């Protein structure tokens, strides 16, 4: 009996389960009603102006729903979400690679941005 029930690597089912159980709209999102209402206004205002969302920072402890909200924001705006994590962006070239894949209005979500390399972080300031 060498089959492990738990693995440190992602399985193909992980992404499928994530898509099944993650809320896909503001209406499905439970909790943080005040913040969700503010985000609804933010999205609606951007839509009416015909512009992409402005930059924003979603902060809070793990498990609060930041990643889920990023997915919802992208879906509500009808754009693609591109995700990465701070530690994975080791140099400016890696960030440039992410930025060149973006279409106008796309959402770039950097999880654990507080762990981003300082020189890479500084290159985001003028963005």
Image (cartoon, grey):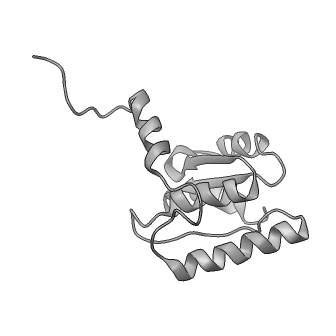
Q: Residue at x 77, y 66 (%)?
A: 53
Q: Is residue 81 visible?
A: yes
Task: Kindly indicate the quadrant of the structure image that contains residue 57.
Answer: bottom right
Which quarter shows the C terminus?
Answer: bottom right
Q: Is residue 108 left or right of residue 20?
A: right
Q: Residue at x 46, y 44 (%)?
A: 20
Question: How many numbered discs sit on the rendered protein?
Answer: 0
**Nearer to me, 102 or 35:** 35
Vertical side of 110 occupied by 98: above or below? above
Vertical side of 121 occupied by 80: above or below? above
Farthest top residue in view: 1
Q: Residue at x 45, y 73 (%)?
A: 31
Q: Is residue 69 left or right of residue 54?
A: left
Farthest front residue in view: 27
Farthest left residue in view: 1
Task: Kindly indicate the quadrant of the structure image that contains residue 120.
Answer: bottom right
Vertical side of 12 occupied by 77: above or below? below
Q: Is residue 113 visible?
A: no
Q: Is residue 120 left or right of residue 19?
A: right
| Residue 74, horizontal then vertical, whole percent | 68, 55
Q: Residue at x 87, y 64 (%)?
A: 51
**Nearer to me, 127 or 21:** 21
**Nearer to me, 51 or 23:** 23
Which quarter shows the N terminus?
Answer: top left
**Nearer to me, 75 or 87:** 75
| Residue 5, horizontal then vertical, whole percent | 20, 30
| Residue 18, horizontal then vertical, whole percent | 45, 44
Farthest bottom residue in view: 34
| Residue 111, horizontal then vertical, whole percent | 52, 55
């Amino acid at each position: 009996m060498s089959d492990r029930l738990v693995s440190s690597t992602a399985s193909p089912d992980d992404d499928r389960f994530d898509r099944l159980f993650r809320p896909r709209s503001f209406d499905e999102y439970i909790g943080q009603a005040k913040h969700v209402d503010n985000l609804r206004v933010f999205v609606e205002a951007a839509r009416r102006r015909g512009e992409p969302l402005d930059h924003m920072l979603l902060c809070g402890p793990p498990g609060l729903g930041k990643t889920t909200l990023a997915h919802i924001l992208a879906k509500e705006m009808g754009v693609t979400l591109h995700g990465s994590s701070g530690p994975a962006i080791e140099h400016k070239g890696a960030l440039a690679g992410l930025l060149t894949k973006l279409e106008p209005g796309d959402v770039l979500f950097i999880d654990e941005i507080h762990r981003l390399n300082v020189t890479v972080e500084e290159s985001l300031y003028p963005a």
